[in-house]
Image (tube, grey):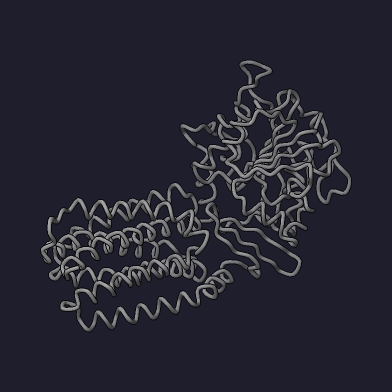
Amino acid sequence: MTDARLRETWLLAATFLIAVAGLIYELIAATVSSYLLGDSVRQFSIVIGVFLSSMGLGAWASRYVGEAMRGFAWAQIFLGIIGGFMAPTLFLAYAWVSEVGIPLYGMLIAVGVLSGMEIPLIARVLKDIGAPEFRFENVLTVDYVGALVASLAFPLLVIPHLGLMSASLVFGGLNLIVAGLSLYLFREVASRLQWVVWATAMALTFGALVQSERLVSVTEQQLFEDDVVLTEATPYQQITVTRFRDRVRLFLDYSIQFDTMDEYRYHEMLVHPVMGLAPRVNSVLILGGGDGMAAREVLRHDGVERITLVDLDPRVTELFRDHPDLAALNGGSLSDPRLTLVNQDAWQFVEATQESFDVIILDLPDPKNIALSKLYSREFYGLLVQRLSANGLLVTQAGSPLFARQAFWSVAHTLAATGNPYAPGEGLSVIPSHVHVPSFGEWGFVMASFAGLADREPKLPDGLKYLTPEVWRGAQVFSVDTGDMDAEINDIQSHALVGYYLEGWDAWFR
């Protein structure tokens, strides 16, 4: 192979590699921002917009680079440094100073500008070396194929096997490898300074990779109050379990899901009123609740013959079924022969199943984005009532009536507006309730039925730590600042709930 042909082949291969790395950086930035800032749809949209506009700025600025090959090598070196250390920098900034916006968008713009310079510079180099039959569309084709590979690899391979910290450093290393090989193949234009900076960056990146587990540990100890005993990234979320003495907490995407100090308050209020009011509890459907806590409470009721638990992330249910310490928290409920685990999207499961259930319990994540909001929509509730038996009951966790008051009442109004198949033209009968859970504040639930239940008291099992008939009656009384208010019905066209949720929590905590 001639020297010119070797260089041409390398530049096309480099185009593929840098396309993979560039999109990975974009996805890392969007994922970190959604973890730390919330609302994944909003954060992904903003990150994509800022990144693409920065790429446009970089493409425009590339015309001012005098020596194309030297400029390309510098771009790869700086991408390796800035992109490679993006995730560690963002997590450390959030842990130590609780600020992520400025470093996030500063680094994102820098990566976008440098990425935007790459293709124009490569095209110029190919022309400079007299590449035979050079066609610009060939460069773009390779670039787009690289982007496709990155978009598929990120959720399936990168996050499950590397995690955000290591992924950032690995792909930073990839940019540095591209820089090093380019400097070698075009060594006649490479400067001594470039070799020194490149070697230093490689050493720092390699050192950070070797210490990446320690870096993750240090960061998480700053993010969480207690000792981190388990942390794992799945294609769906970041799972973190912490412990302080006998106190265990579960965090998903860095948001607390339960604390063993007080989780019984939440789960008793979620499960026992609906189970105690249902005329029959033979068949129970739980959507979410992959930690098995809700299932544990359901199994305290006589007459339960079958529980179907649907949770999207198989790793969560696997951990809380098979890990001895975690399974002990739910009393081994996920291994009970009466329980069937289904790892599937809740909407898809409800749409496909033909089963009928006496009780449906929705223990789902908060509706902080459109993907979750659809599971609190009138359309989804309409599907659920078709799966309820004639005297069946449904309950959903509905967020905080204090921190996100309008969001809570939007859920209640949406359930009340859901069509009642046994009373054409009418909606469901609903009972809102609330409980104080110290770990995450005042929390609410909404129960729905085909007929009124307000005058009935639930039959409660023995041995509960919190719920009594008197507590249940009080739980249905709301204070002036948490009581009913105007709120739109949530549907898959408007997703009014997402706005209510974000506005409420932002008012309290931003």
The foreground one among 148 and 92 is: 148
Quadrant in which the N terminus is drawn: bottom left
Whole-percent x, y for residue 479 in the image:
68, 42
Can residue 480 be seen at all in this image of the molecule? no
Corner quadrant of residue 76: bottom left
Q: Residue at x 35, y 62 (%)?
A: 21
In the shown orientation, is residue 290 left or right of residue 335? Answer: left
Residue 97 visible (yes or no): yes
Is 154 positioned to the left or the right of 393 in the image?
left
Rendered image quadrant of residue 181: bottom left
Indicate the position of residue 433 as horizontal and vertical percent values: 71, 39
Q: Nearer the viewer, residue 5 or 125?
A: 5
Residue 503, horizontal then vertical, whole percent: 50, 46
Task: Say which residue appears at 51% left-offset and 47% top-offset.
Answer: 502
Q: Residue at x 50, y 53 (%)?
A: 38
Farthest-out residue, top = 424
The mark total stands at 0
Image quadrant of residue 280?
top right
x then y, percent, for residue 189: 16, 77
**Above or below 4: residue 193:** below
Q: Residue furthest right?
A: 462
